[in-house]
Image (spheres, helix red, strand yellow):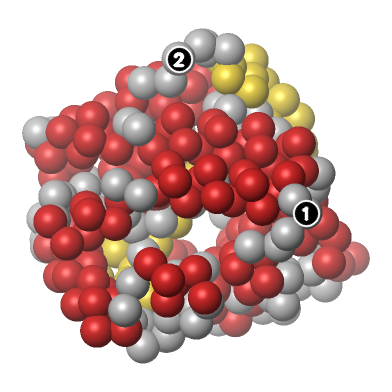
Amino acid sequence: MTHMPQISNDHRPPRQEGDAAVPGGVLHYQLTGPANAEHVVVFENGWSASLSYAVWLEEALSPHVRVLSYDRAGIGDSRSTAPLTPTALTQQLLALLSTLGIQQPVVVVGHSYGGLIAALHAAQAPAMVRAIVQIDPTSEFDHELIDRSFRIMPLVGRFMQLCALLKIDGPIFFHTAKELPPETFARIKRTPGWLVRSLSGSIEEFRLLDGMRRIITASEAATQCPRLVISCAPEQLVNSWLRKLLMSDEKTGRYWNAIHGLHRRQASLNDASRWMSVRNNHISLVTNRASAGEIASSILDFIR
C-alpha cells in the first residue's frame, strides 16, 4: 500500500476556490494539488453533504494528484437555476471541467450517494471518466429491503431541516464534530437558513434515484468502467438514536449484509474492478483522518 506522508499546514498544495456558471446552475468548487499532476480526481459528495466534509481525503490525495471538489447544484454553496435531471448532473460536471481547463479523463471518487453519481457519470460521459471509486455507495441495483429505507429519505431531510431551524444538532453533526477540524465543521454547519436551503436541494436531487439507476444499469460503458468499491464494516455502525429509531439491530445487520452483497456485485462487473472493506462506519470513512488516509492510499494504488 502506498505510504501517505504527513502534510503540515505550511506545505499544503495550492488551492483554487470559486464559482463557475454551468447550464442550470452555478457550482462552487475547490481545486487543489499540482497543476501538472498526471491524474485528476473529482470528488462527489454524499447525500446532503457539502464539499468541506472530505477535508482529510483531499489532504491525503492532493500532494499526489489534482483534486476537484464541488457542491452539486442546489446543495452547499452551489445554486440551481433550472429543474435538475440525471443528464444535467453530468452536463454540469462537464461544463465545470471545461471552465477549469481540465481536458484529460478523470477518476471520479464518490461517497455514499456520490458513489451512485460517479457511476452515472461513467454511463453518460465515458470519454470523461477513466475510472470510478465508490466509497460505501448507494447501490445502482434495486433491492427490496434497502429500497424500503430510501422511501423515507425525503422525510429524513425535512426532519433535518426542522432541526436546523430549531438550532438542534442532528446525530450526524454530533458525530462529525468529533472528527473534523473546528473551522471545517463550522463551515459545514453554517447558518439555519443555509442548511435548510441546501437540504431542499438534496431532497430534490434524491428524487432522481430511480432515473439514475435505469441509466446506469442499461449502460455498457458503466458496466465496463474500472471501479474500486469500498464498503464500511457493518459492525462499525453509527450508534445514534436516529439509526435505532429507523431500524432495529437485527434489521440493521440484514441491511448491511445486503449492501455488501450489492457492493461486491458492482465490483464484479469487469475484471479491472475490485472490492475492499475498511473498518469504520459509513460517515467516518471520509470524516475520520486515519480512515480517509487509508482510503486515499487505496485510491492511489488503484489509479496507478
Q: Nearer the viewer, residue 45 or 131?
A: 45
Q: Amino acid at mark 2?
A: Pro
Judge left or right: residue 1 versus residue 195.
left
Residue 48 x, y percent position in the rendering:
54, 46
**What residue is rendered at 44% in x and 46% in y?**
155
Residue holding disc 2: 83
Tag 1's secondary structure?
loop
**What residue is rendered at 45% in x and 30% in y?**
204
Residue 188 x, y percent position in the rendering:
72, 52
In this figure, what is the number of numbered marks? 2
Q: Residues within 10 Å of mark 1 (few under 14, many from 20)?
A: few
Q: Quadrant of residue 148?
A: bottom left
Sequence-earlier tag: 2 or 1: 2
Tag 2's secondary structure?
loop
Depicted 248 relative to depicted 112: above or below: below
Q: Quadrant of residue 128?
A: top left
Q: Quadrant of residue 243?
A: bottom left
Quadrant of the frame with the N terminus: bottom left
Q: Amino acid at mark 1?
A: Lys
Closer mark to the observer between disc 2 and disc 1: 1
Residue holding disc 1: 167
Q: Can residue 153 be seen in this snapshot? A: yes
Q: Can residue 126 be seen in this snapshot? A: no
Judge left or right: residue 212 versus residue 299.
left
Q: Residues within 10 Å of mark 2 (few under 14, many from 20)?
A: few
Query: Which numbered circle lies on residue 175?
Result: none
**What residue is rendered at 47% in x and 36% in y?**
203
Judge left or right: residue 217 versus residue 301.
left
Residue 6 x, y percent position in the rendering:
72, 78
Quadrant of the frame with the C terminus: bottom left
**What residue is rendered at 42% in x and 26% in y?**
89
